[in-house]
Image (cartoon, rainbow, N blue to C red):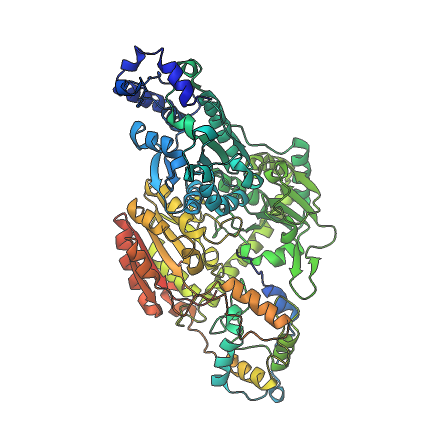
Amino acid sequence: MMLVVVASVAAMRAQAPPAQSPATATPSGNADEGKKLFVSYGCYQCHGREAQGSSSTGPRLGPKPIAFTAFSRYVRRPTGQMPPYTVKVVSDTDMANIYAFVQNRPSPAAVQSIPLLREP
Amino acid sequence: MTNRRDFLRSAAVTGAAALVPAGEALHAGRDASLNPPGQAAQATAPVAPREVDPSDGGEVITTDRPGGDFMVDVLKTLDFEFVASNPGSSFRGIHESIINYGGNSKPEFITCCHEESAVAMAHGYFKAEGKPMAVLCHGTVGMQHAAMAIYNAYCDRVPVYILAGNSLDATLRRPGVEWAHSVQDAAAMVRDFIKWDDQPISLPHFAESAMRAYKIAMTPPMMPVLLVLDGGLQEDPISHEVTSRLRIPKLTRATPPQGDSGAVAEAAQLLVNARNPVIVADRAARTPAGVQRLIELAEALQAPVIDQGGRVNFPSRHPLNQSGNARALIADADVVLGLELTDFWGTVSTVRDGLTRTSRSVVKPGTKLISITALDLATKGNYQDFQRYPEVDVAMAADAEATLPALTEACKRLITADKRSAFQERGKRLADAHKTALERARAEAAYGWDASPISTARLTMELWGQIKKEDWSLVAESGIMSDWTARLWNRDKHYQSLGGSGGAGVGYGAPAAVGAALANKKHGRLSVTIQGDGDFLYAPGVWWTAAHHRIPLLAVMHNNRAYHQEVMHLQRMANRHNRGITRAHIGTTIDDPNVDFAKIAQGMGVHAQGPITNPNDLGPAIARALEVVKKGEPSLIDVVTQPR
């Protein structure tokens, strides 16, 4: 049987603090390592392997994520449907690596350059 | 009841009738089939047994006119096109009557490999065609297999006409299996999720109950019905005593219940005077007319419509379609009109699935809630699909589609020139919001466009690019695909999306798609399904059914190699318990080895390709598959995708 988990995507967006990027608050992370962690910690399950998000499970995270402090706070103590990732499960170092991966996602091509999206 | 002993008694006094040629009986049967539904038909003349074996003390060993023939006359009068079934001895009598006496036409026997497939095929067929398909199954083992699919149809308010075989007379059962396939009350195990059942004990009783079952099933709220057919009733000759009472009653469909005029007027007042009314529809449009009726109401009010997708209730590209802005609109609403909602409470509330479950209303205090649903006329107690109790202000126990014309007219009578002007302004704002939402969805679809595994947005649009100029029908969508088809495809016909399973019982997608494609075939529609991998594996024999019956269907798989919903549930549990998710794949993923779905489909006689992992390979694969489908065959493409 399937139980549908309705992720409160909009709620998460609303409840997460607004994006800000104080450079000093963002630890340097390893994006390649973060890519592996993004899979092994199951982030991709709701947010997609490219962090592209899903309307039914979890929002897009990259390539311009919310500020690291807010990102980390939400992962530790989510207020929506997301399960909590405590420091016991995801270390601060791993968190930084995941953030680096999300940050490094490529920007998509413009919609107008993709015929299948451009046409009605 | 007519049983074999009764027959022997009657046979002794019907020597002359025993000479009636079989051909006459067949001819009479065809005559009966010509009676359109709704007109009474005289039953065919009885034919007593024509052969007597003198070497066996006069025992009659054949008959030209078993009870099953009369049952077929009744089914023909009800205009069933198909009967889906996995063959079983408890209904061998009517099976034989269908294929020989009935000429295997109306109904045509559709061979299924599982009873769950048969019922789900009927489920999908109804949503494409608007009339029920019959299903034949064992009253015991068949019913047990069918139960999950019956529950789905019940939750989805879909009529399925189930005929179950049984052997009532214990003294006439064959030893062994026939006992295991007999039951006192075959309907008992499904009675909680069907609308009505009967076990006729005579052919006249069958005829009346057949009409009654059809009428009940097709009256909103629509649900499955069940007739249990005794083996003797199917197989034994029709006695002269019974013949004199045989007739097929007239079928008169009940008109769907409309909302009370006072409640309609009250609802109209609330809607016209609202600043921010919102219309939410789930299973409101039962027919093509339902879509038009909802358009008329929405345009009269210039009110936003949120289509929850149980059916195509509202055109996706209509400027008043605001399904993508549902949450914000409901939060800002002062009146919410719910049309055949599965879950009104859930529409205006949110629940957090945390260690402590919390819920809160998402509407403003004082927001008026209006409900129109036929479900208020038929709610059962055991299974809890009725959802949490919604505290509405106006509750019409009525069919929404039937009530919409009166509601629209009542609204129009109240709309003054000033209000009309304000409504037009609202409509312009909503049109802008609709356009913005569509642009936003396209922009979101571009993320991960070239990813492998293939993004669900890419899959959706590769498919759309090749079907949009056809008369297409999305017959099922068993993988959860981030709502891309609803957000990006232009759908304005009732058959362009047939909604989900109803009960969320996995295994619905493939057979429902095949059943709906069977309905679409004669209309020349291109049937398309997005096929989940977990769903595929429940009863994959339905692909053989599609191949065997030449049912054209394009199936594109959303193969994320997991019961992904359950992966996320395990992830939630593991994190809640502070253990991490490294073992959440145990019991939830479908890999090691990866399933070769194309090979399975090919083994069933279905043209198939894949697995496809490169997004650039997908378009050409769809083009190849379409060539096959347009020739009248099913074709499947296995696509390895992102989770959602």
Whole-percent x, y for residue B328 in the image: 62, 59
Q: Is residue B2 above or below residue B271?
A: above
Whole-percent x, y for residue B387 in the image: 63, 49
Whole-percent x, y for residue B48 in the image: 33, 17
Q: Is residue B498 left or right of residue B33?
A: right
**Foreground of the two, B26 or A43:** B26
Q: Is residue B610 left or right of residue B589?
A: left
**Foreground of the two, B200 or B489:** B200
Whole-percent x, y for residue B480 in the image: 48, 59
Residue at (58, 50) in percent of width and height = B304
**Foreground of the two, B276 or B162:** B162
Q: Is residue B584 left or right of residue B561?
A: right
Q: Is residue A39 above or below residue B352?
A: below
Q: Is residue B101 among the parts visible in the rendering?
A: yes
Q: Is residue B261 above or below residue B395?
A: above
Residue A71: image quadrant is bottom right
The total of numbered circles placed on residues is 0
**Foreground of the two, A19 or B96:** B96
Q: Is residue A36 above or below residue B170?
A: below
Q: Is residue B317 left or right of residue B621?
A: right
Residue at (33, 48) in percent of width and height = B546
Q: Is residue B218 among the parts visible in the rendering?
A: no
